[in-house]
């Protein structure tokens, strides 16, 4: 399995899904990994999502044992979908890593691993978004119960 190369969980510098995508309630992604463009073998369908509890990083690691700094950047996929206004997308993502052979003569090659995915974004409901936009009233200071505002003293 490839080594994770990002220090933070998501590419834009935040560590949680909620902070990275405050406008989303959930992001569901289903994928199958392939070992190259000609690989026709069916692999196990895998799923990830924020509400499922397994979307804790922006990158899903590549399963190639000789891949370094690789993985599939799901957070960039989600950000691109939000930018274009999409809620569903199907396609392929290439691993961003490099294969380093033991021979080392040819230098590092791009990892050939890829995933076929289906991504579904679930935006927050309007009432959830309104709650986020409204200031928290419990943090406002009040003088006391039943009393009006202080009177200006006429000194």
Image (cartoon, rainbow, N blue to C red):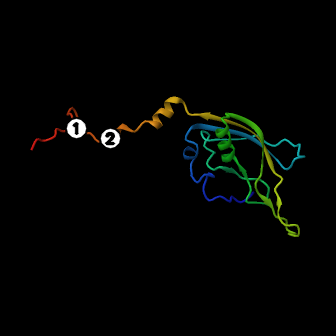
Q: Is residue 71 left or right of residue 130?
A: right
Residue nearer the viewer, 75 or 103: 75
Residue at position x 80%, y 48% in the image: 114
Q: How many marks?
A: 2
Query: In this picture, is 47 found above or below 69?
Result: above
Q: Position of residue 40 (x, y in %)?
A: 89, 43
Question: Alpha-carbon distance for marks 2 and 1?
Answer: 12 Å
Quarter holding the C terminus?
top left
Q: Is residue 67 left or right of residue 154?
A: right
**Contact, CB < 8 Å: mark 2 with mark 1?**
no
Residue nearer the viewer, 26 or 83: 83
Q: Which residue is mark 2?
A: 140
Secondary structure beneath label 1? loop
Residue at position x 47%, y 37% in the image: 132
Q: Which residue is mark 1?
A: 144
Query: In this picture, is 109 found above or below 119?
Result: below
Q: Residues within 10 Å of mark 2 (few under 14, many from 20)?
A: few
Quarter holding the N terminus?
bottom right
Q: Position of residue 46 (x, y in %)?
A: 73, 42
């Amino acid at each position: 399995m490839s080594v994770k190369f990002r220090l933070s969980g998501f590419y834009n510098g935040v560590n949680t899904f909620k902070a990275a995508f405050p406008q989303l309630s959930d992001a569901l992604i289903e994928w199958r990994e392939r070992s190259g463009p000609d690989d026709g073998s069916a692999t196990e369908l895998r799923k990830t999502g924020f509400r499922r509890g397994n979307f804790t990083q922006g990158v899903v690691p590549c399963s190639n044992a000789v891949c370094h700094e690789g993985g599939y950047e799901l957070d960039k996929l989600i950000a691109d979908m939000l930018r274009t206004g999409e809620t569903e997308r199907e396609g392929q993502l290439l691993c961003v890593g490099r294969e380093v052979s033991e021979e080392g003569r040819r230098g590092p090659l791009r990892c050939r691993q890829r995933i076929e995915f289906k991504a579904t974004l679930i935006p927050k409901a309007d009432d959830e978004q309104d709650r986020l936009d409204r200031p928290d009233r419990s943090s406002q200071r009040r003088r006391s119960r039943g009393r009006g505002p202080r009177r200006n003293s006429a000194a």
